[in-house]
Image (cartoon, rainbow, N blue to C red):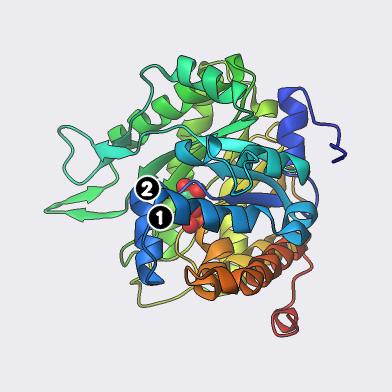
Amino acid sequence: MVVMTKSPQTLEDVAMAMVAPGKGILAADESSGTIKKRFDKINTVSTDDTRRDYREMLFRTSAAMRGQISGVILYDETIKQKAKDGTPLVQIIEQSGALPGIKVDEGAKALAGFPGETVTEGLDKLRERLTAYRELGARFAKWRAVIDIGRKGDRTIPTLYCIKANNHALARYAALCQETGIVPIIEPEVLMDGDHDIDRCAEVTEATLSHLFAELIQHRVKLEGTVLKPNMVIAGKLAGKRAGIEEVAEKTVRVLARTVPAAVPGIAFLSGGQSDEDATAHLSAMNAAGNLPWRLTFSYGRALQAAAQKAWGGKPENTAAAQRAFAHRAKMNGLAAAGKWKQDLETVA
Ligand code: 13P
C-alpha cells in the first residue's frame, strides 16, 4: 500500500508547500504544439502514447519527485491521462508527495490594435474549467502572460497598454483560482528574445511587476495564497554584451525587492531559454546572497527537461538514462534553491 503524505489544505499551505525549502516546480505543461517541437529535436513522433510515455518516465523518477519536486504543472491532456499500467498520472505524482497543477490559459493571441504584442486568452468559462480541474486533483494552476521587448517599425514595445491588458487578465484568473480553492501561479514573462541589454529588461520587468501587484490587490487576490513566476532580469539572447552570473542575480533581486510584496510566500522562476547551467547558477547566486523576504526557487520547463529529452530520444531502452539526467538537474536546482550549488557538482553526476 502506498502511504500518502498529508496533503496541505489551505491556499497558504499549498503555496508554502510549492516553495518548500530546497524544492521547486517541474513545468511539464507544454501544449501539443510545443511538445511536438521538443520531440522533433530528438527525432520522436509526438503522439498521445509517446507524450504519455515521456511524461510517465519523468513522474516515475522517484529521486527527483520525492527529493526536489514540490509540484508538477500539467497540460489538459496529461491531467486526464493514465500511465501504461492504468494508474492515473495524477496519482503517480500524488504518491511521490508532489502536488499536481494545471495550465489553464489558452495562449498568447495578437492584441488588436497593437502590432507585435499579445494578450493571453482563456478567461471565458474559466470558473467551470477550474472546478473540473480541481475535481481531477489540481491544487494549483498556471497562467502565462507574454511581454516582448523590441521595436515594431518606429515604435518600441512593450506598450503600457499591453502590460495593463495582460495584468488585468492575470488578476482575474488569480481571483477565480482562489475562489475555487486553487493556488494561482502568476506568470508575467518578459521574453529574453532580442538584443536588448540587461538594464532594459530590468526596466520592463519592474514596470510589469509594479503594475501587476497593484492590479492583484485591486482584484482582492490574497497574496499569501499565490506564487509568482517571473523571468530573471537578463540580457536578450542576441545582446552583444552578456551580463555575468552575479549581475543577473543582483539586478533580479533588486527589481523583485522593489515590486513584490513580502506577503507573497514564494517566487518560482521560469528558465525562458537560459542554458540549464545558467538557470541553476543564477538561482543559486540569488539564494546565496540571502536575506530575502520570499522563498526563491525554480519552476523550470526546458532547464529541467532538456537533458532528459536528449538522453531519452524516444526510446524505451533509454528510460533509466533519461531519469538519471532529470534527477541530476532536479538535484542541482534543489541545491540552487538553497544557495548551495557549485559548478564542480555538475561533473560528479
Ligand atoms: P521554461 O522554463 O522552459 O521557460 O518554461 C517554464 C514555463 O512554464 C513557461 O510557461
Tag 2 secondary structure? helix
Q: Check the image and report above or below for 220 versus 215.
A: above
Q: Check the image and report above or below for 89 versus 306.
A: above
Tag 1 secondary structure? helix
The disc label shown at residue 158, or none: none
Q: Position of residue 287 (x, y in %)?
A: 73, 59
Tell me if I can see residue 175 in this picture.
no
Q: Check the image and report above or below for 312 versus 141.
A: below
For residue 326, which quarter of the picture? bottom right
For label 1, count other residues whose C-alpha is less than 10 Å away and answer few (under 14), some (14-19) or many (20+).
some
Compare residues 340 and 326 and report the one nearer the observer: 326
Disc 1 residue type (three-letter): Ile
For label 2, count other residues whose C-alpha is less than 10 Å away and answer few (under 14), some (14-19) or many (20+).
some
Q: Which residue corresponds to the image point at 61% horizontal and 63% vertical from the top-left?
A: 249
Q: Which residue corresponds to the image point at 62% horizontal and 45% vertical from the top-left?
A: 72
For residue 340, which quarter of the picture? bottom right
Disc 2 residue type (three-letter): Ser
Q: Position of residue 123 (x, y in %)?
A: 38, 22
Compare residues 281 and 310 and report the one nearer the observer: 310
The disc label shown at residue 35, or none: 1
Q: Quadrant of the C terminus?
A: bottom right
Q: Position of residue 8 (x, y in %)?
A: 79, 29
Q: Position of residue 168 (x, y in %)?
A: 40, 25
**C-beta proximity under 8 Å, tags 2 and 1:** yes
Circle 2 is placed at which residue position? Answer: 32
Tell me if I can see residue 61 in this picture.
yes
Please give left or right for residue 294 compared with residue 80 in the image.
right
For this orientation, the residue located farthest to the left is 153
Asked if the residue at label 2 sits under 8 Å from ligand 1, the reply is: no
Q: What separation in Å lies between label 2 and label 1 (alpha carbons)?
A: 5 Å
Please give left or right for residue 125 compared with residue 324 in the image.
left
Q: Which residue corresponds to the image point at 41% horizontal and 33% vertical from the top-left?
A: 105
